[in-house]
Image: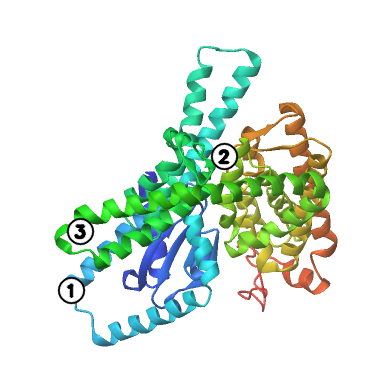
Amino acid sequence: MSTDKNRATAAAILPLVGGPDNIGSIAHCMTRLRIALHDRSLVDGEALRALPAVLGVVEDETYQIVLGPGTVARVTPEFEALVEEGRSSRTARTPVTAEELADRGAALKQAQKARNSTPVKLFLRRIANVFVPLIPALIGCGIIAGLNGVLLNTGWLPAVVPALAAIASGFMSLIAVFVGYNTAKEFGGTPVLGGAVAAIIVFPGVAKIDAFGQHLSPGQGGVLGALAAAFLAVHVERLCRRWVPEAVDALVTPTLTVLVSGLVTIYGLMFLAGEVATAIGSAATWLLSAGGAFAGLVLGGLFLPLVMLGLHQALIPIHTTLIEQTGHTALLPILAMAGAGQVGAALAVYCRLPRNRSLRTTIKSALPAGFLGVGEPLIYGVSLPLGRPFVTACVGGAAGGAFVGLFNQLGVAFGSTAIGPSGWALFPLLDGESGAGVTIAVYAGGLAVGYLVGFAATWFFGFTRQMLTDLNTDPQPVADAAPTADAGKEPAMT
C-alpha cells in the first residue's frame, strides 16, 4: 500500500516538472528530491506546491522538491522508474526532433553556465555529497553508543556492553575508508581505488613509519586526510587513463594510482590533514569556551539562512572531524537552536492568523517535523514566503544558541555523537562530561528559549498591519457560506 502511495506521489510530480523528457538527472538528500531540468519554464510551480506530499520547493542549480525525511527515499526510486518508463514509451512512439535537441542543448548550456558561475558553492556541495550517505550509519552508531553508555553507567547487562561498544565503534574506526570511496565516486574516479588509498590512514602499520622526522599514528588526518587522499587519487587515475596504453591500462593504472597517491598520503597528507583536524578541534573548543553566549548567538542566528541556501551540508566534514576527535560535535546542539526559533515563529503565525485556515493547516502538518528538527517544511511553507517571520525565527535561533553557548562557557560542555537529527530527535545522541541529567536539561532549556523568543519576536515584529489585513482571511470559505461578490478571489498570499 505504501508503495502505491509513493508511486502516486511520483506520478503526480512528474507532469508538473515537464514530464520525462525534461528531466536531466535525479538525486535526493535527506529531505529533498533534486532534479536537473532542461527547461524550467515547463514547471508548474503553483500546482507542485499544492500537492499534499510536497512540503516546499527550492529553485537552485537543481530543482529541489522538499518531501521530508523517509518519504523522499521512497518516492525517488518510483520517480526514477516513471521517468525511465516515460522515455522508453516515447522512444517507441516518436523520434526526437532536431528542434527538441537544439532546445535541450541550449538549456544544458545555460545550466552549465550557471554552475560555472558559482564554483565555490558547487565544490562545497560536492564535498557535502561525500558525507551525506554516511549520515544513517552515524545516527545508528551514535544511538547505540548512547545506549551502551547508559548500560555502562547503570551496570545493567554487563555481558552486552562490549558487544555494543564494538557495534558502535566499528564504523567510526573505518569511516576514512567510506569517505575515500565516496570521494572518488563523487569526483569521477574509481570508488574502490579511493577507498584503498584512504585505508592507508587507518592501517595500524603506519605506526612504524617516520615521515620526515614525524612519527605517524593510525587515523592521523582522519576524514579530512581521507578526503584529500581520494581526491588526489582521482586526478592520478585520470592522468593514467590519458597516458597509459589501453593494452596495459588494467594493470598499470590501478597500481600507479594507489602507489603515487599512497606515498603522497603517507609522506605529506596525513601530517597536514592531522594538523588541520587538530586546529578545527581546538578552534571549536576555544570558540565555545571563550566566546560562549556570543558565539552561540551568531551560530544559532545564521544557521537558518544556511539551510535556506542548502549550504548547511558543507558543515558535515567539520562535525565528522569533531566526532572523530572527541566522540561528539559541540556545534550541532547550538545550530539545532535555529530549528527551535523556526518552530516558535510558526506557532506565532498560527496564533496571529486565526482566520487563515489554509496557512494554519500547513503549519499543523509541518510542526511535528519541526519539533523533530526538520525545518525545511516550515521554512519554505511558512516563514520564508512571509518574509518577516523568517527573520524573527533567526532571532529565536540566536537566543537559543546564546543560551547553550553560555553554559558551554560555564563548563557544561556537551555535543552530539552523530549528525543529522536535531530538535527533540537529538536527545538520544547527547553526550557530555557533566552527566546526562545536566546535559539534557541545558539542551531542553535552549529549545525552550528558542521557542519562546521565536514566538515573541514573531508576535510583536513578524507582521505589519497591512500583512495582517491581507493574510488574516479565509481563502477557502465554508461550503454553506452565503456567496458574495468576491467569492472565488484569494488574498495576495496564503
Residue 202, quarter of picture: top left
Q: Is residue 14 left or right of residue 492?
A: left
Q: Is residue 436 left or right of residue 268?
A: right
- As shown in the figure, which amino acid type bears the numbered disc 2? Glu
With respect to residue 337, does 149 lie above or below?
above
List the residue tagged with mark 2: 324
With respect to residue 264, does 466 lie above or below?
below
Q: Earlier in the sequence, mark 3 or mark 1?
A: 1
- As shown in the figure, which amino acid type bears the numbered disc 1? Arg
Res. 60 in view = no
List the residue tagged with mark 3: 249
Q: In percent of the image, x 51 and y 33: which residue is there? A: 141
- As shown in the figure, which amino acid type bears the numbered disc 3? Asp
With respect to residue 326, does 229 lie above or below?
below
Which of the two discs, 2 and 1, sits closer to the camera? 2
In the rendering, which numbered label is found on residue 93?
1
Tell me, yes or no, whether the two marked residues, 3 and 1, touch with CB atoms within 8 Å: no
| Residue at the outermost front position | 213
The residue nearer to you, when weighing 346 against 261, is 261
Q: Gap in Å between the C-alphas at discs 2 and 3?
A: 37 Å
